[in-house]
Every structure is written in structure tokens, then in C-alpha cells.
Image (cartoon, rainbow, N blue to C red):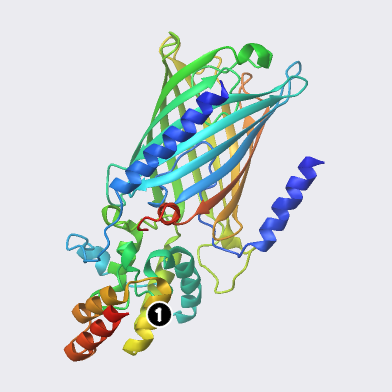
Amino acid sequence: MTRGMMRTAVLGWSFTVALLSAVLGQNTSYEPDPHWQAPADAAAQGNPLARKPQAAAGGKKLFLRNCTECHGEDGTGIVKKHAADLQLPVVQSQSDGALFWKITNGNPDRGMPSFSRLPELQRWQLVLHLRTLQSAGPRSLGETLKNRFLTGRKPIQFVRRLSVERSPTTVSRISFLRTSRSLNKV
Amino acid sequence: MRLVRFLSFLVMLCFLLPAAEGEEAPYFVTYDHQLEEPGNLEIATSSTMGVPRAGEKFYFAPYVEFEYGVAGRWTSELYLEGQSTWNDSTIFTGWRLENRFRPLKREHWINPVLYLEYENLNEGSRIQKEIVGNAPALGEPNSELRQTHAHELETKLILSSNIHDWNIAENFIVEKNLSAEEGFEFGYALGLYRPLATLASGANCRFCRENFSAGMELYGGLGSTNAFGFHETAHYLAPVVSWQISDNASLRFSPAIGLTHDSNPVLLRFGYSYEVHGFSSKVARLFGGKP
């Protein structure tokens, strides 16, 4: 076994992987997958930790470790990762059982890995923590934009996204246009 | 002296890194259905130490593994391996390129994974990442073993289930040496493990039970198409334990006990793995591309 052969193996593998990564890269804009729905029996499951809200602290720890890379620390999602904003009503309106099912199964074709390797109770702890993201309350547009700048999102892209996803009362069309114009100048 | 320094470095590393939950499978030989997350790279260094029978020599076989999540249901790995025999020499024994595919999208009662590996090795290979066919002869010197090369193709059917926090995995192995007329060789690996605690504490603790997983592996060869069965095959029963020492790093240990005369009496396995999250984005950024 020569050094040349070893170098060929390393270079060959790196090249193949780099090429495939470019081809199979994730999308840049998030749209919920209509086919990713929990079965009715799974969605009807209750959270066994519902009466132990103190378990959410463990859920937060798990969230920071496993989820923030794509969903961000506050769960609002990182656009370049094609990740869902977990504070949105479209997520928060789902039952505990449905969220548990989605964490367990993942959606590999859309970049969401399966977390079935975590023990069941830890997945329920994650669901508990997701619920605390909802209760964080509405934030001001300025504050949210500041967070976005820090997480690397393009401001104009985020403002457009906000205008689509938030209700019209949260971000008015006027403020949207003004903000877009000023940000585009920057 | 080097070993002491290396161990001190590992211990220091354990205390410098932030604590985390236990979730890395402790297996050395058995595969479960968990694949690498897309875009992540895991770098692992492991070793197999063979405690010999009388008349045989002690050997140490380290290997490095680069595991990359190519897509949600596809993981690719590259292995580089070597071997050092007491009172003999240290040699590079070859490389392996492995791919695992998950045909099914969702979690099921039994989750199948298809495994395909190409191996370019010489006869000095001792990492025993899988046991197939008949037991290898351990008496020959490295200078002779390194002369014999083997191009092998290996396939596995991996079946794995998560049942009440237990993982149970079964691997069925078929290997074909493309360089010699040895027929098809067969092997198996069975494993089960469980985290020591299933509820995560809110505290950022390092030695909590939730950071440890423990279980058992059973693996061995089943002969070949020329001589199928247990005759002259090696089989091992191996307790396994893993410790997730940080968000990215874990340690594994397994003392495997040989069950037949053709097995090593004991195989000691150690492993350290480090996960690079978002590796593909980091590489893209390095070359000025879009992450």
C-alpha cells in the first residue's frame, strides 16, 4: 500500500463528497411540506410530561444542542438552512403528538433529520420547550431584524418573509415598504 | 511517555468541553439505522487491541474514520487503518470506502439500511470492524502479510429498531474478495443498548447518567460458500459503553471476549469521535461560496 494510493483515496473521496454536496444542497427558502403530516393516532398522543413543566429546562438544553444549528436559538429558523420558524402559528397550532412524531421521524428529503436516537422522554421534553417558544410573545420588528442580522439572514429577504408569514396587523404594508426601501439603500 | 501525554490530553479535553446528552450509539461493530446528519462530518479515531493466546503476538490496530452526511438518507465514510505488532513492525494496512442508504423515509418497527463497502487492504489488517469467514492466522510477520493485497466488496443488511429506549440492531454481512477465489464470506453482528437515563436534566452536567449509554454486542464469522458454518470461526461477546463528553465529542469502550478457540481471548476497543456540525457550509464559506 503506497502513500500515493492513500492520497488518491482521500482526494477521491473528498472530491466525490464535495460534488454531491453541491448537487444535493438544501433549498434557500422555506415552505412547509404539505406531505409531512403526522398520522391521526400519532397526532392524538398526549405529552406524558405535560404535568411536569420543570422538564422543559432539560428540553431547552436538548434544543440548544440539537436544533439551533438550523432553527436558531429562539426557534425562528435560519433561512439559508431552509428551516421552519417554530414560533409561527402553523407550527404552534399542531398537537404535541404531531410535533413529537415530526421530531421522531424527521423529513430527510427536506433536510430535517430523525431524532429517534433520543430517548422518548427527551423528545417529549423537546416538545415542552417548543411550547415555551410560543409564549415568548410578539417582538418588535426592529428587535427581530436585529436578531436576524446577528444570525446572518439577508434583511430584505427576512422582511419579505415576515410580510407573508405574519398577519397584516403585525407588519403593515407601509412599514414593509419603508423598511425594504431603507434596507435596500444600505 | 507519549501514551501518558495522549491520555492527559484526552482527560483535559473532557473538562474543557461543555457537557451534553448521551445519544451516540456505543457500538463498534454493529450498525444501527442512524445516519449522519446532512452536511455534518464526524471524525473518529478508534483502535482494536488483541490480547493473544500463547505463542502469538500482541497487536494494536488503530483506524481513523471520516463520516459525512451526503443527504438525509445517505452517509459516506472513509477509513484509513494501520497495525502495530509487538516485536515486529508498524504498517499501513489500507483503506475502506463505505456507503449506507436508508430506503424508507419514516421510522418503522424495523428500519432497514443498505450498506456497501469497498476495501483495499492487505493481510495485515487487524481492526476487525467486522468478522467474516474463517478466523485469520495471527502468527505470520507483518513483512509477509503486507505483501498480500485484497480488493474486497462487502455488503450488509442492517435492521434496527428503537423499542422503549432500547436500540436493537441486527447486521447480516456478505463479503467477496475480488482478488482471490475464496467464494463469498459471511458474518453477523447483533447489538442492543440503552441510555442510562432517559430524562434530560436542566443542569449542564458532565457525569450525569443521561450522558452514558451501555449495551452488548455479539458478532462473528459464519464461514464461506466453500465451508459454511461455525467451524474455525471467531465469535465475540462484547459489553459496550459510551460517554458523551460534550456536544460534539464522545468516548467509547468495549472489552470483547472471544467465545471460540479461533477467537482472540480478549479484544479491547477504544474510540473517540468528534462531530463537525455544518461542515459543508464551513467548506463552502472557505471557498467564498454560498453556505
Chain to which the residue tagged by mark 1 belongs? A
B94 shown above or below B277: above
**Horizontally, is A114 left or right of B224 in the view?**
left
A108 shown above or below B28: below
Furthest-front residue in view? A185
| Quadrant hosting residue B85 | top right
The mark tally for this picture is 1
Q: Residue at x 25, y 66 (%)?
A: A30
Amino acid residing under circle 1: Asn
| Mark 1 Cα-neighbour bin, 10 Å: few <14, some 14–19, many ≥20 | some
Q: Residue at x 30, y 49 (%)?
A: B108
Q: Kindly state the secondary structure of the residue where label 1 is placed.
A: helix
**Horizontally, is A82 left or right of B24 in the view?**
left
The quarter in which the C terminus of chain B is drawn is bottom left
Q: Residue at x 67, y 58 (%)?
A: B14
Q: Position of residue A151 (x, y in %)?
A: 41, 72
The quarter in which the N terminus of chain B is drawn is top right
Q: Residue at x 73, y 20 (%)?
A: B57
A86 shown above or below B110: below
Q: Position of residue B289 (x, y in %)?
A: 37, 55
Q: Position of residue B68 (x, y in %)?
A: 43, 45
Residue B10 in view, yes or no: yes
**Horizontally, is B156 left or right of B237 in the view?**
left
Q: Which residue is mark 1?
A: A147
B166 shown above or below B61: below
Depth check: B264 or A155 in front?
Answer: A155
Q: Position of residue B8 (x, y in %)?
A: 76, 51
